[in-house]
Image (cartoon, rainbow, N blue to C red):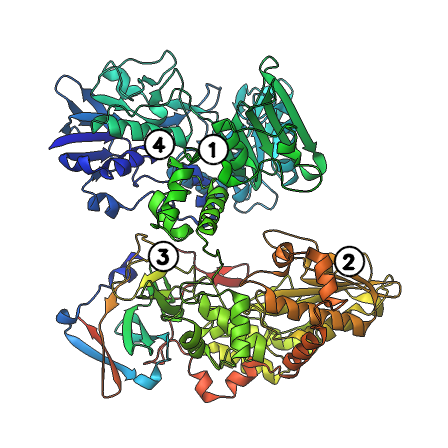
């Protein structure tokens, strides 16, 4: 189980080596999440239309190791964009992946860019 | 920089660190803390919660990262073997030396294991650490494997911890037997009669109690098979958990010649100093006033004193009298004991109230002059504990007729103890974190805090045992009111309204969708609380299905299925009233077989198919719909089922056709979204085989019509539905149901079922009857019309979804690939399958 988690490491914009196209903007539901596949990874992509912002994180909830975060509800807490895991409602920041209740759980985040109506996720591998 | 070494990373050792780094002057000190267990300090008080979730992290006092951030060196898995006082060094089991300027011993205690013959046998455990629990779990599983009957296990010791352990043993599927030497349970806290009340209550939930038993011998060859008390007195048990008190872990004190108590414990003065002024002892290892205090609150107070002494605040010392009051919820039963629970006649007199039918016991002990409360006991209902405890602690005046403190004032007016605001500012409300009433109220009146969350974050009140929570809530609300601020239950940070207000706002303003509601009445992006709540309001106003505003639905509603443990879904077609034809039953079987689904009959008389992947849901539903099924809405906060017994069509006792009526009602309200799920039942006679009184609404056939019951439920707080109207004909029953359900939908809070809604409804059931039956508000016709409108608009949302390619897009695991989730693993179980266990 542990190695499933280990393949997810946050990628910063500067360390991106591959911008991987995952579809068109219209393929992604508004104000909610969806899941894409990159190599063996499952990545959750979130589309906030009110601020036209996109976020991407691992799809794996580190609490019980289920591929479910893209199914969670999104929103904000104290102005931090977040996703609530559908299993036990653990809240994670979409900016830095930290658990918003201060628990020792963290998810990896990935940069997203939109160009000509296409959605790209940045990976370092 | 001076070095402080703390030996012991338990609750008290951790609390020492927390209080130490909170002080400004701690900057000149460096703390190193040693823990013998592999984990950082965790909350032992709530250890039995580990059974519910198996989540050790949830019990942690603070994560490892906290220690790092505070500049504290945390070394776990390391035992200290020696203290060299002359050179001020300690030695670890790995033979490493560390130097200290101040040493704090917080080594705690170990369970006391009595010297009984055979106690070393396999299957005998102590109850103290997470590792103990894990070992018990593994053993319990092993002895139960392949067995059909229940396996018995004993707990030695009927004290606080012993009863907790008995609950844990029961949760493992074993039949628990508590064995206590004394003639009563919780001998230090309870008198004989309250022990009897507690015993009856816990025996009713399956915990067996054996009092006045001295164990001679543990029976068995290699592993335990029983316990022997006397020659012919024994019980057969296959596991034993020892919880017979604690012994301080004081061996380090002995090795370096600190002054020790005759029966153990390291002697400390009121500065928490041992006989060596540079060595402190706190918590359960410390012997203060010739006593070991096995509670967390005095341990935290000792930590506070030691911190201040080391940092030079010499005037902060330990109080002479230590309050040993406790309140806890034991196996679902409130138990509290404060001050002097037993009263010698020369000091005062007692007033006792006992109600065996309700398993209630209350005792107060009052001084001879009738002016002071000296202590007492509460079993069954401890809701008055906080107030009584404060009256005792602060010597507050008590009513002339002291019995009002337990039975309430006779006649009109308030109960015996007036307002929570009457207690003095210096009164300690949260004893775990030493927070006074003044701290709580002034944090609000001085403008630092604006709500309960702020107050908890600032003062840490309620974060220990949590017993003071009701009083803190009252104090916060009263303080807010005193500032003229309205105390309001708003739904979340995005909407400053309660559910009823939002319902009205959305309806009156004809708001179109969630984003519109957010624009008009809210702020931010929303969250997992307000989104599904508003989705439910839209559905209750316009009967829209979750297919219209997919993004604001809870995950279950979003995919029209119930998400299960491994991220797969379950499928429940509607089987109204539990009636199904053989042909349809065959279809369910064929579909389940084709998609390899785990199949089980539910409590609501229908069939649940588990283990479907997202992309399979539409395929499965296509086949079910083609065979004439429709959604069962098992995933929604909506009408689930109307359960029926077979009624007069077949049953020789049946009075009316309960199945027909159940089907009619279920079909009338199918798809109806409400603040919480709704369940109904219809029984054909008073034998009540449909369990209609355990439902939100129930009908029972009687001579001349139906008796209607409302506001019952099963679940965590079971409640029987209350008789609402008698001998109704079919049409009147439906009319009242329409009005009742619509009134509930309009006015209930989010996720509040009908029973708690009725509890809070001012005027209670009589008021509800006035509104629904007598139409006292003049809205009855409106309610009926609204309900009829919703009924007319019903449409099966699964049919809607599979016929619309745009709606179907969401039933796919990946946006950019047709692959399915390869993370799913199933294992076989009794000829079917189940998800592989977590971690």
| B696 to B576, vertically: above or below | above
Which residue is found at the position 30% from the left and 20% from the top?
B251
Circle 3 is placed at which residue position?
A: A63
Residues at marks 3 and 2 touching, judged by CB atoms closer than 8 Å:
no
User: Which dot, 1 or 4, sits closer to the camera?
Assistant: 4
User: Which dot, 2 or 1, sits closer to the camera?
Assistant: 2
Q: CA distance from mark 2 to mark 4?
A: 54 Å
Mark 4 crowdedness (10 Å alpha carbons): few <14, some 14-19, many ≥20: many
The image shows residue B611 at horizontal and vertical percentages of 49, 68
Which residue is found at the position 46% from the left and 88% from the top?
B805
Label 1 residue SS:
loop
Front residue of B59 and B91: B59
User: Which dot, 1 or 3, sits closer to the camera?
Assistant: 3
Judge from the rendering whether residue B72 lies leftward or rightward of residue B536; answer left or right. left
Residues behind callouts 2 and 1 on a single chain: yes
Q: Which mark is residue B688?
A: 2
Residues behind callouts 1 and 4 on a single chain: yes
Q: Which mark is residue B569?
A: none
Which residue is found at the position 21% from the left and 18% from the top?
B277
Residue B703 in sight: yes
Q: CA distance from mark 2 to mark 1?
A: 45 Å
Label 2 residue SS:
loop
Mark 3 crowdedness (10 Å alpha carbons): few <14, some 14-19, many ≥20: some
């Amino acid at each position: 189980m542990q190695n499933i988690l280990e393949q997810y490491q946050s990628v910063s914009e500067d360390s991106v080596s591959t911008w991987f196209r995952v579809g068109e903007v219209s393929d992604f539901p508004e104000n909610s999440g969806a899941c894409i596949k990159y190599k063996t990874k499952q990545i959750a992509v979130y589309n906030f239309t009110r601020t036209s912002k996109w976020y991407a994180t691992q799809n794996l909830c580190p609490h019980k190791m289920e591929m479910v975060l893209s199914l969670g509800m999104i929103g904000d807490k104290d102005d931090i964009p977040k996703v609530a895991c559908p299993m036990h409602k653990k809240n994670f920041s979409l900016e830095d992946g930290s658990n918003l209740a201060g628990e020792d759980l963290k998810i990896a985040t990935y940069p997203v860019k939109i160009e000509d109506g296409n959605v790209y996720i940045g990976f370092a591998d | 920089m001076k070095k402080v070494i703390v030996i012991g990373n338990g609750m008290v050792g951790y609390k020492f660190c927390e209080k130490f780094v909170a002080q400004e002057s701690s900057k000149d000190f460096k703390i190193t803390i040693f823990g013998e267990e592999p984990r950082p300090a965790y909350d032992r008080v709530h250890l039995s919660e580990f059974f519910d979730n198996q989540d050790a992290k949830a019990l942690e006092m603070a994560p490892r990262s906290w220690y790092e951030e505070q500049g504290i060196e945390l070394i776990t898995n390391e035992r200290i073997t020696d203290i060299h006082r002359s050179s001020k060094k300690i030695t670890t089991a790995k033979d490493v030396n560390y130097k200290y300027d101040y040493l704090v011993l917080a080594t705690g205690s170990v369970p006391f294991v009595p010297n009984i013959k055979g106690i070393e046998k396999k299957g005998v455990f102590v109850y103290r650490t997470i590792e103990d629990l894990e070992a018990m779990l593994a053993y319990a599983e092993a002895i139960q494997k392949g067995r059909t009957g229940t396996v018995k296990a004993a707990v030695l010791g009927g004290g606080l911890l012993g009863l907790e352990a008995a609950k844990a043993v029961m949760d493992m599927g074993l039949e628990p037997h508590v064995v206590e030497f004394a003639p009563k349970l919780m001998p230090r806290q309870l008198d004989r009669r309250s022990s009897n009340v507690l015993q009856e209550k816990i025996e009713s939930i399956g915990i067996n109690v054996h009092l006045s038993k001295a164990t001679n011998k543990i029976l068995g060859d290699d592993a335990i098979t029983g316990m022997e008390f006397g020659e012919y007195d024994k019980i057969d048990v296959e596991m034993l958990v020892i919880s017979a008190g604690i012994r301080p872990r004081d061996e380090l004190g002995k090795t370096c010649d600190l002054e020790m108590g005759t029966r153990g414990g390291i002697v400390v003065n009121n500065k928490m100093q041992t006989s060596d002024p540079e060595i402190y002892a706190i918590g359960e290892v410390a012997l203060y006033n010739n006593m070991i205090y096995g509670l967390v609150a005095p341990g935290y107070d000792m930590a506070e004193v030691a911190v201040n002494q080391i940092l030079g605040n010499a005037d902060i010392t330990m109080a002479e009298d230590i309050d040993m009051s406790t309140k806890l919820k034991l196996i679902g039963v409130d138990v509290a004991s404060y001050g002097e629970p037993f009263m010698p006649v020369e000091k005062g007199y007692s007033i006792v109230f006992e109600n065996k039918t309700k398993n209630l016991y209350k005792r107060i002990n009052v001084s001879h002059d009738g002016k002071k409360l000296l202590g007492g006991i509460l079993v069954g209902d401890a809701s008055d504990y906080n107030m009584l405890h404060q009256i005792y602690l602060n010597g507050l005046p008590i009513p002339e007729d002291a019995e009002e403190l337990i039975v309430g004032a006779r006649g009109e007016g308030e109960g015996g103890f007036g307002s929570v605001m009457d207690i003095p500012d210096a009164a300690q409300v949260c004893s775990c974190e030493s927070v006074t009433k003044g701290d709580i109220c002034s944090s609000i009146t001085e403008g630092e805090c604006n709500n309960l969350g702020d107050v908890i974050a600032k003062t840490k009140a309620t974060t220990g045992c949590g017993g003071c929570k009701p009083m803190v809530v009252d104090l916060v609300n009263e303080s807010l009111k005193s500032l003229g601020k309205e105390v309001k239950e708003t739904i979340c940070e995005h909407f400053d309204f309660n559910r009823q207000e939002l319902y009205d706002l959305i309806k009156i303003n004809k708001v179109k969708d969630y984003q519109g509601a957010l624009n008009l009445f809210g702020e931010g992006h929303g969250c997992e609380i307000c989104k599904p709540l508003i989705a439910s309001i839209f559905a209750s106003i316009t009967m829209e299905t979750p297919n219209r505003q997919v993004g604001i639905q809870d995950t279950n509603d979003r995919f029209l299925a119930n998400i299960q443990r491994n991220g797969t879904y379950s499928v429940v077609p509607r089987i109204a009233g539990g009636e199904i034809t053989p042909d349809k039953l065959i279809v369910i079987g064929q579909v389940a077989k084709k998609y390899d689904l785990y199949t089980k009959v539910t409590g609501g008389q229908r069939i649940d198919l588990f283990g479907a992947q997202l992309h399979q849901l539409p395929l499965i539903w296509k086949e079910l719909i083609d065979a004439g099924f429709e959604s069962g809405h098992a995933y929604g906060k909506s009408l689930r089922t109307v359960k029926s017994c077979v009624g007069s069509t077949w049953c020789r006792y049946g009075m009316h056709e309960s199945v027909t009526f159940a089907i009619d009602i279920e079909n009338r309200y199918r798809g109806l979204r409400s603040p919480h799920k709704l369940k109904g039942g219809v029984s054909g006679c008073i034998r009540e085989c449909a369990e209609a009184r355990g439902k939100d609404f129930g009908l029972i056939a009687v001579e001349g019509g139906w008796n209607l019951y409302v506001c019952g439920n099963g679940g965590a707080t079971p409640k029987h539905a209350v008789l609402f109207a008698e001998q109704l004909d079919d049409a009147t029953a439906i009319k009242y149901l329409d009005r009742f359900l619509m009134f509930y939908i309009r006015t209930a809070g989010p996720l509040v079922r009908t029973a708690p809604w009725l509890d809070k409804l001012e005027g209670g059931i009589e008021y509800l009857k006035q509104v629904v039956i007598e139409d006292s508000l003049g809205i009855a016709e409106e309610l009926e019309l609204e309900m009829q409108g919703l009924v007319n608009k019903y449409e099966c949302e699964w049919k809607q979804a599979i016929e619309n390619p745009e709606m179907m897009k969401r039933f796919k695991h990946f946006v950019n690939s047709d692959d399915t989730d390869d993370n799913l693993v199933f294992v076989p179980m009794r000829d079917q399958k189940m998800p592989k266990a977590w971690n």
